[in-house]
Amino acid sequence: MSAVMKAPDVRDAYLASLAPDVHSLAGPGPEWLNALRAEAAACVNSQPYPTTQDEEWRFTDFGLLRKTAFASAADISLEVSLADIEPFVLPESEKSRLVFVNGIYAPHLSACAGLPQGVVISNLAAGLPLHDAVIRTHLAQQVDFHNEAFAALNTSHIRDGALVLITKDTACPAPIHLLFIATGADMPQANYPRCLIIADAGSTCALIEDYVCLNQGVYFTSAVSEITLGENAAVEHTRLQRESLSAFHMAYGAVALARGSNYTAHNIAFGARISRHDLRIKQNGEAAQCTLNGLALISGRQIADTHTVMDHTKPNGQSTQLHKCIADGGAHAVFNGKIFVRKDAQHTNAAQQSRNLLLSNKARIDTKPQLEIFADDVKCAHGATVSQLETEEMFYLNSRGLDALTARNLLIYGFAEEIVDRIPVTSLIKQLSKTLSEQILEHT
Amino acid sequence: MISSNSKVILEVRNLSASVAGIEILKGINLTVRSGEVHAIMGPNGSGKSTFSKVLAGHPGYTVTGGEVLFEGQNLLELPPEERARNGVFLAFQYPIEIPGVSNSAFLRLTYNTQQAHRGGEELDPLEFNDFIQEKCKIVEMDPSFLDRSVNEGFSGGEKKRNEILQMAVLDPRLAILDETDSGLDIDALRIVASGVNKLMTPDNAVIMVTHYQRLLNYITPDFVHVMRRGRIIKTGGKELALELETRGYDWLDDEHQKAASV
């Protein structure tokens, strides 16, 4: 707890090592991008980093992160082969995959051949000359990097990233796999993955934003994703955080919904020593729909913190959220889900559920659903439960011949699988179900 | 199907049990032989459901006296999973939903666990699929229910059918059906009852716990026992159920008290 008491202006090892170097700010790309990086860098250098004394960060004690110095990632993407990433490859995305190694684009691992007209999947650097105007209109426009330290850090380090553009009324035929690989090298290093997704009016696509590791090393991922949905667009977004168990993962996601659009997210967190995911969704148009499914399954000394903000600003919007945490060992899971229903957002229908499973006496789960309603004609519901495995459920399985351990594991598996099952990619469900069974068995 | 030289499957002697310090069963005696169907009837709160849960080993109940022999073995010293593997099956009054676990995976896991215990052959998913398709016919269950999560979103009747499907898979020596008829419409009742009848053999036995006589129109009991305040106060043939239907339970109470005071 001593880290908590430190004054925020003390520059810890990680802050000193992560701070953008003004001299190297001018990177590839147009002048406006340099200006953006410089502006973000100024924010990084001027604003205090959050500590557990900040209300929004009080459970994310990343004291361990503060003690670590990180080197910037060098380009070692060529040392990674297709065979190395094979366990993560999805057959459904054979021709719609972008791979980044330690945040750096790896063309030899990516595969985006034969995409239909109206679908652009490329790295940001390659996309810039072709789509400068649209990128400039959207990049860093939704993340509030002036107030979010880690978003500023990522923005100041933008070199490359994933770019997905789906033009008007186009349906992307295959799920798009954005695979971010951390090599988990000997030296702790920092990676800055970035995603920019623009789904124009009437378009549809499925995305998989996937953070994986090749080795269980110490590293730091600071990720930012921005997603814009045009009118009546539909995006189904699966986000997997399966980082090294020694890694730090600080991620920020911002989603903007236009009239009649439909955004579905499946946010799954298995990995990282300390992880934090901030997700902000804004319904900017009428009758937008949003479904958020979340699952954190952690053990040992892992911390997984999810903060979501669902902001209804226009009438007739809908949102449904189910977030589950399972904490074993001495792990600590946190969920904070805010729902705003603004004055104009009449006839909003918002439902949020936080369901949690504590598997050990030393594990801890903090859940905080928050509703702030300023409109008078709305339907909102929220609820939170934290429980241990139920006697009746256990007895049912025992009475079918399953012993206590098998019954327990099956119930934990089912609790988690209910979320995993909702992912729209069959091969990914299989991958994750296998991981689930292995993780549950490992910790019994 | 009564035959005096059949094997005794279950022998309950003076069984008493309590929950949270309150005595619910106050000395039950019951002998069940292979090939027999026993109906246990009684008003609400008589202890019928408690009796079935105690036999299956529910951890919420404390056995305070008596003994239960299952095929000659002390049943009460076994944890519920071992009772199940040895051949005791309880069809739940309120089957539990297990979201995220597919019905077919669950059935296969329980079947293979059972087989491992009995030294039988375990089935891989393909083999099990053939096996379970046949079992589904017994309860007229659409095979699409196999891909759904266990009992999740099932109607009352579908849940009860799923219980009998599990019974068909596990092939128990003694099946205890706890209010299996409750919440069923007439068609579902017919299907569930016909499933049970198809599963009856000269080597197994069924105990039906029920509040109403109507299930007994479909599954004919060899014995009808009436429970009242934690005891079996009267035993008769299937005609006793009909008498209960017309006269209710109170007359038995009077008769029992008279007998006790003599």
Image (spheres, helix red, strand yellow):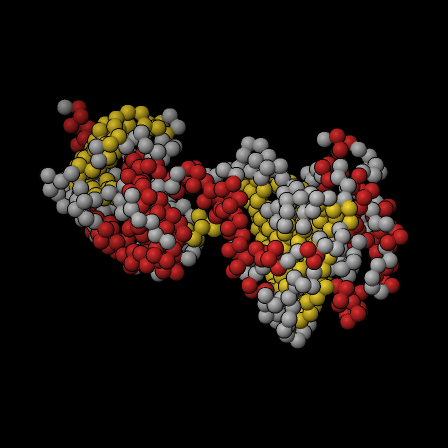
Q: In the image shown, does A365 or A272 lie closer to the viewer?
A: A272
Extreme left residue here?
Answer: B4
Residue nearer the viewer, A58 or A86: A86
Residue extending farthest bottom? A117
Q: Is residue A263 visible?
A: no
Residue A325: x and y, percent? 57, 44
Q: Would residue A90 be seen by someone viewing this image from the given angle?
A: yes
Which quarter of the picture shows residue A28?
Answer: bottom right
Place of residue A84 in the rendered image (x, y in percent of width and height, measured from the top left): 61, 55
Residue depicted at 66% across the width and 54% down the height: A181
Measured along the vertical axis of the image, is residue A237 above or below residue B209? Answer: below
Q: Is residue A118 left or right of residue A354?
A: right
Identity of the residue furthest to the front in this view? A79
| Residue A257, image quadrant | bottom right
- Place of residue B145 in the rendered image (x, y in percent of width and height, measured from the top left): 39, 57
- The one of A240 and B216 positioned closer to us in this rendering: A240
> Which quadrant is the C terminus of chain B positioned in?
top left
Residue drawn 62% across and 61% down?
A: A177
The picture places residue B39, in percent across and down from the top left corner, at 22, 42
Q: Which quarter of the figure has residue B6?
A: top left
